[in-house]
Amino acid sequence: MKMWVLKTTIFLQILSGFCFLGLHSKTHKQYTFVVKEVQYTRLCSTKSILTVNGEFPGPVINAHQGETVYVNVYNRGTHNITVHWHGVKQPRNPWTDGPEYITQCPIKPGEKFRQKIIFSTEEGTLWWHAHSDWSRATVHGAIIIYPRKHRTYPFPKPYAEVPIIFGEWWKNDVWKVYTEFRRTGGSPNNSDAITINGQPGDLYPCSNSGTFKMNVDQGKTYLLRIVNAAMNLILFFSISKHNLTVVGADGCYTKPLTRDYIAISPGQTIDALLYANQEPDQYYMAARAYSSGAAVPFDNTTTTAILQYNGNYPPISSPPLPYLPYYNDTQAAFNFFGSLRGLPKRYPKSIPFNATTHIETTLSVNTFPCPKGQTCEGPNGTRFATSINNISFVAPSIDILEAYYYHIKGVYRKGFPTFPPFLFNFTAQYLPLELQIPKKGTKAIVLKYGSVVELVFQGTNLVGGIDHPMHLHGYSFHVVGYGFGNFDKAKDPLQYNLVDPPLLNTVVVPKNGWATIRFKATNPGVWLMHCHLERHLSWGMETVFIVKNGKGWNETLLPPPPDMPRC
Ligand code: C2O
Ligand code: CU
């Protein structure tokens, strides 16, 4: 029996090899990603950064809905790396999803991995990024998914499309920033600038000439494909004298939502229409941090780009900055997030009504005591940690997917708690110190194929409450409710939106609040779920879903590709 399975696998691989060489080579688009260090100058100083093909932000991947694309990733850098296709569901194929030690071992310097990206229902804008240590700071780019042939956008066709990618720039080497805060247990240094398409913008020193400019014709409509690739910052974004009409989020179209500013968390993407309906002139586009965490004061420096109308006119000498909410304006952030609505007409029958699996999780910032003989730079001389249901995730040394597939023992354990281990007033202003210390663990939540999962995220005020943009790999989920304070199991579900909840891959759980998502577990495999604030991820705010196979072949995990990186 085993032999038979092995032979079939080899046969299938030979077959797919043939397809690649001959039969279907025209139908699969191929990209080459060479990960390598290149010199870049920003904020008056030059340093070497890790890039894909020398570009920052990296190259755009273009596809049509339902297409399959291959990316040959070559590691020509000096550290291990992996690449993840954020928001691409990869049906039955977690093998090339990317998170280090979850679905693969890293690509070592000098090695290569051919990654298959299977697009299915996604349309609009997504993105790709490195998924190992902090290399995603500069290793990221947009994914643009056009409608299938003979299908159109659910909005008038824009005249042109422009990617707007937010990032963060450190003058220091990001690898050093990473290793330093991991060593001391303290908070990582704040970045020195927020960037738009790789540029800090003209309010920062030495940044005038590079400032990103978007040229428009008066009277035309443009589609902005907005990606927040920043490491640790939720952002507000707006354009002077112009509104934005959001028509999509996280690779799914939404009901149109017109606002004078948007909020976007790391991991999220937004498609927004911009109508160039003002007097020909230059207008500022600007973004700055929404940073509610009491422990992390963030400076209010604003990154800018310029919306520049075509034509002959004398530009006003000092254009005003647009309105942006203040950096701790939680109401402004959730006024936006909470107004997004899905487009059930376009995605019929996708809203799950009756949940079969209920999961409740607490999201906490924690501390570990400082090991003897060391000095630690976390709160009161401790080390920072984060946890889900009081478990701070520890990455294994063999990836969980291979351990699951090949039945390798001792890599991870089942039985991640699906309910908080202690109940207390999660959002109380003062919480006892002894609740701060989490457990360490490498545990997974195992789901039966087809379970309808309802998952409540509850943010706690341990150490300090803060918003958590929670991201799930392999799925989109409906955000059916959210609120401030403690989740009330009796009352809050009565208010769930089961009519037009947005379909996202990253939900921002409010500071000292909660959010509920629903999804149907129809994608077998191993899928990571984590906070998309990079420092929280580094400290352990992550867990893994293992979704078992269903019955038919199309409900079964695919075999691994032949060139999986070795552990
Ligand atoms: Cu943007 Cu684990 O991903
Ligand atoms: Cu977080």
Image: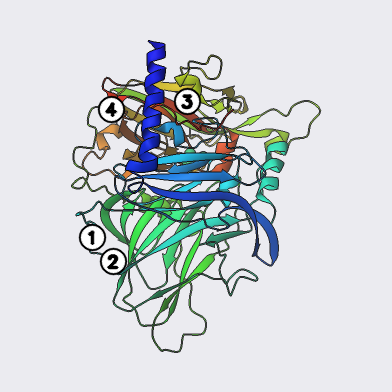
How far is disc 1 from disc 3 in space, using C-alphas? 40 Å
Going from N to C along the chain, the mark reached first, 4 or 3, is: 3
Q: Position of residue 335 (x, y in %)?
A: 36, 52
Q: Amino acid at mark 2?
A: Pro
Closer to viewer: mark 1 or mark 3 = 3
Q: For mark 3, what is the residue?
A: 401
Say which mark, if any, is on residue 554.
4
Look at label 3 and name its amino acid. Answer: Leu
Residue that mark 1 sits on: 155
Residue 221 location in percent, x, y? 30, 70
Tell me where residue 288 appears, x and y as whole percent.
Answer: 51, 60
Between 389 and 115, the residue placed more toward the observer is 115
Q: Secondary structure at mark 3?
A: helix
- In the image, taking residue 355 as reference, residue 419 lies left or right, namely right
x 49%, y 50%: residue: 32
Q: Residue at x 69, y 67 (%)?
A: 44
Residue in the image at 61% along x and 68% along y? 204
Q: Secondary structure at mark 4?
A: helix
Q: Relative to 402, say whether 176 is above or below.
A: below
> Can I make out residue 470 in this image?
no
